[in-house]
Amino acid sequence: MKFRKKPVVIDAIQWNGDNYPELFEFVNVYGQMNKENDSLFIRTLEGTMEASLYDWIIKGIKGEYYPCKPDIFASTYDKVEQ
């Protein structure tokens, strides 16, 4: 059997190294940054995950957060004009 992923609009922000306050506000208390290597650690439903510089942080449909690599993000999501 084959399945197609349902279209879902998500909220996301890209970690660029300079936008920690904006990221922290987006993720709220779920994230904390390791300033030694510019990594952001996000508590997800599967445990703590590390987001590297330029990864996208996605808010899922159940309010959960998780990181996504830029190439996967680009191939999976299109920008929605508001």
Image (spheres, rainbow, N blue to C red):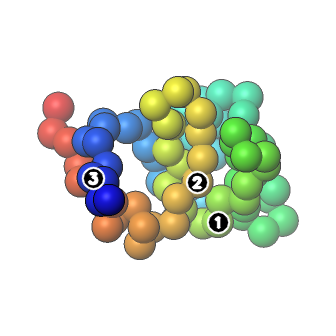
* Pointer 3 residue: 4
* Pointer 2 residue: 67
Residue 77 or 1: which is nearer the viewer? Answer: 1
Q: Nearer the viewer, mark 3 or mark 2?
A: 3
Question: Is 3 left, or right, of 62 in this rendering?
Answer: left
In three-dimensional space, the C-alpha distance between marks 3 and 2, rounded to whole angstroms, equals 22 Å
x%, y% of residue 75? 31, 67
* Pointer 1 residue: 52
Residue at point 59%, 33% (across, down): 64
Question: Is 26 left, or right, of 37 in this rendering?
Answer: left
Tag 1's secondary structure? loop
Labels 3 & 2 near each other (Cβ < 8 A): no
Q: Amino acid at mark 2?
A: Pro
Q: Earlier in the sequence, mark 2 or mark 1?
A: 1
Q: Earlier in the sequence, mark 3 or mark 2?
A: 3
In three-dimensional space, the C-alpha distance between marks 3 and 1, rounded to whole angstroms, equals 29 Å
Q: Nearer the viewer, mark 2 or mark 1?
A: 2
Q: Nearer the viewer, mark 3 or mark 1?
A: 3
Residue at point 78%, 49% (across, down): 48
Question: Is 3 left, or right, of 61 in this rendering?
Answer: left
In three-dimensional space, the C-alpha distance between marks 2 and 1, rounded to whole angstroms, equals 8 Å
Tag 3's secondary structure? loop
x%, y% of residue 33? 76, 50
Q: Amino acid at mark 3?
A: Arg
Q: Quadrant of the C terminus?
A: top left
Labels 2 & 1 near each other (Cβ < 8 A): yes
Determine if residue 33 is in view: no
